[in-house]
Amino acid sequence: DRFRQWNNELAGWRAQFSQQTSDREHLRQWQQQLTHAEQKLNALAAITLTLTADEVATALAQHAEQRPLRQHLVALHGQIVPQQKRLAQLQVAIQNVTQEQTQRNAALNEMRQRYKEKTQQLADVKTICEQEARIKTLEAQRAQLQAGQPCPLCGSTSHPAVEAYQALEPGVNQSRLLALENEVKKLGEEGAALRGQLDALTKQLQRDENEAQSLRQDEQALTQQWQAVTASLNITLQPQDDIQ
């Protein structure tokens, strides 16, 4: 029994010793935290307020006095930033319209050249068809021409062109004439459509350039106001900066 009692007491002493060791470790950690906190507190204590009551009052009064300027700056920011964005959009639009205008002009010049060539071909074929029509009207007289017999018109006894006239096929050139007339008409319509598109692009470009010029003038005036306000506030800010 006494032996069990000693074992129990020994176990209790061991538990107490372990608890004391843990408590000492916690105490050491707390002391370190306390030392760190005291160092921070000492550092804060070293910072002293250098403004007097009058200086604080003056600063507050100046802050209140500058409130309208700050409000004006916010209003200017709300005007300048959207204008800058719109101006950037217009610059892209002007570039795109100018590029499209160049392409349409090139297409129109090419179409004009084709129209000129086809018109000349049409005129040539029309002349041939007219000549063939006149020759066709003399078919009866031509049929009466006999080799060695004088022509009733010129008296010549030689008729070398009779066979050539007999070989004429007016329908072939008439078909060419009709096809060329259709081509010329189609080219004319396409050219008119291109000119209409170019006219619309020119007007759009003029509108965009006028709006861009107006925006640049407004932006310049607003930027001058911005610079004056920031100078009065003794701050350095650009209109595109975030002022919120």
Image (cartoon, rainbow, N blue to C red):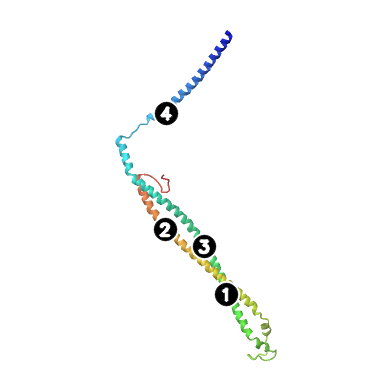
Question: Is residue 161 or residue 244 the one in the foreground?
Answer: 244
Q: Earlier in the sequence, mark 3 or mark 4?
A: 4
State the residue position of label 1. Answer: 120
Of helix, strand and loop, which one carries label 3?
Answer: helix
State the residue position of label 3. Answer: 102
Q: Earlier in the sequence, mark 4 or mark 2?
A: 4
Q: Earlier in the sequence, mark 2 or mark 1?
A: 1
For residue 38, which numbered disc appears in the image? Answer: none
Q: Earlier in the sequence, mark 3 or mark 2?
A: 3
Q: Earlier in the sequence, mark 1 or mark 4?
A: 4
Instruction: Describe residue 130's horizontal placement relative to residue 86 as left or right.
Output: right
Q: Is residue 73 above or below residue 125?
A: above
Question: Closer to the observer: label 1 or label 4?
Answer: 4
- The amino acid type, in three-letter code, at marker 4 is Lys
Of helix, strand and loop, which one carries label 2?
Answer: helix
Residue under the image location 65 percent in, 78 percent down: 171
Question: What separation in Å lies between label 3 and label 2 (alpha carbons)?
Answer: 22 Å
Instruction: Describe residue 152's horizontal placement relative to residue 83 as left or right.
Output: right
Crowd band around label 4 with a 10 angstrom C-alpha radius: few (<14), some (14–19), many (20+) = few
State the residue position of label 4. Answer: 40
Question: What separation in Å lies between label 1 and label 4 (alpha carbons)?
Answer: 99 Å
Q: Position of residue 165 (x, y in %)?
A: 66, 83
State the residue position of label 2. Answer: 213
